[in-house]
């Protein structure tokens, strides 16, 4: 027994309604804006809040919060795939998407979900924008970036990366610097610090846990490196940033003081 007959009846009802789905061309234009790292266009789109309006008109659930949650998760899935096609390493894109989906799943209001939706779109766009500044056209570098992301908890070396992609270490180092604009070591360090920032802001992980998860030799080493890279200690960063961005945005959106 299938739902075909029920679906046909439902389609008949929907044809009598005036609500229309968003044009695929409009959707793909937004996905392309994210993929191309066009932050200005993406920000203008988000500020118009058209996505919220459309999502609340096209019902995927009778529960309004759940309905909006479904729409945002679908959009994130599409953005993830577009960004992978645009050069973002697959594992990095999926983990970034998973992070926001879990946050959206835990959110309890439409405003909270919209804030996370906007933050995710901006996050993906900024990362694609950064990638556009460095032309990444070779398969070995794409494989290296993916390897680094999936081994973030380890002390990855150039020799190890070279073996993984079948290149001479010296050649890989030169190729990486040419295409990424920085050394392998600096890139790995930047990725670890960016990940640490996310955990400090959005999780309750201790400094010891973060240090271990990111492959630092000790908590003191992690604090030293973090402080040098950001200009503040992990404690100060957490004190200033812990969930404050989401809370302040929420107050703006909901009119709270």
Image (tube, rainbow, N blue to C red):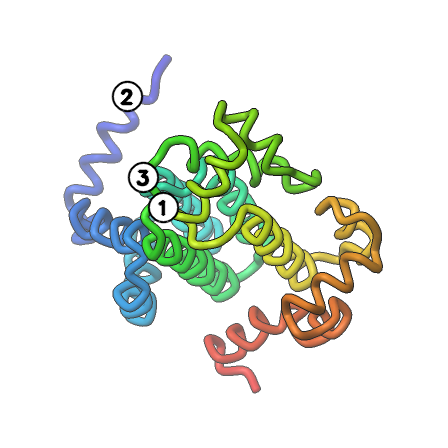
- Please state the total of marks drawn on the protein image: 3
Closer mark to the observer between disc 2 and disc 1: 1
212 sits left or right of 160 in the view: right
What residue is drawn where x is 37% and y is 57%?
Answer: 125
Residue with the most extreme top position = 1
What residue is drawn where x is 48% and y is 65%?
Answer: 115
Q: Residue beneath label 3, please?
A: 137
Mark 2 burial class by Cα count in 10 Å: few <14, some 14-19, many 20+: few
Residue 57, position as x, y percentages in the image: 30, 55
Q: Which residue occupies the foreground of this view, 232 or 121?
A: 232
Residue 188, position as x, y percentages in the image: 59, 48
Residue 136, position as x, y percentages in the image: 35, 43
Q: In which quarter of the image is the N terminus?
A: top left
- First in residue order: circle 1 vs circle 3: 1
Q: Residue beneath label 2, please?
A: 4
Instruction: Tell me how far mark 2 sits from mark 3, CA to CA.
Output: 46 Å
Q: Which residue occupies the foreground of this view, 155 or 103?
A: 155
Check contact, mark 2 vs mark 3: CB within 8 A: no
Residue with the most extreme front position = 170
């Amino acid at each position: 027994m299938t739902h075909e007959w029920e679906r046909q009846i439902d389609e008949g009802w929907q044809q009598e309604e005036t609500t229309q789905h968003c044009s695929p061309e409009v959707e793909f234009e937004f996905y392309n804006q994210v993929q191309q790292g066009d932050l200005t266009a993406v920000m203008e789109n988000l500020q118009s809040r058209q996505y919220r309006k459309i999502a609340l008109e096209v019902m995927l659930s009778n529960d309004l919060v759940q309905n909006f949650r479904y729409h945002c998760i679908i959009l994130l899935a599409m953005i993830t795939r577009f960004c992978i096609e645009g050069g973002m390493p697959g594992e990095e894109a999926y983990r970034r998407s998973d992070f926001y989906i879990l946050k959206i799943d835990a959110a309890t209001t439409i405003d909270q979900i919209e804030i996370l939706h906007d933050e995710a779109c901006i996050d993906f766009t900024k990362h694609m924008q950064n990638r556009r500044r460095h032309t990444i056209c070779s398969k070995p570098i794409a494989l290296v970036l993916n390897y680094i992301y999936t081994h973030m908890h380890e002390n990855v070396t150039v020799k190890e990366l070279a073996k993984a992609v079948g290149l001479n270490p010296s050649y890989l180092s030169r190729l990486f610097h040419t295409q990424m604009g920085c050394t392998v070591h600096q890139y790995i360090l930047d990725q670890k610090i960016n990940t640490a920032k996310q955990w400090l802001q959005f999780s309750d992980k201790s400094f010891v846990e973060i240090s271990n998860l990111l492959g630092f030799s000790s908590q003191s080493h992690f604090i030293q490196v973090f402080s040098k890279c950001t200009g503040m200690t992990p404690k100060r960063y957490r004190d200033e940033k812990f969930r404050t961005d989401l809370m302040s945005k929420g107050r703006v959106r909901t009119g709270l003081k």
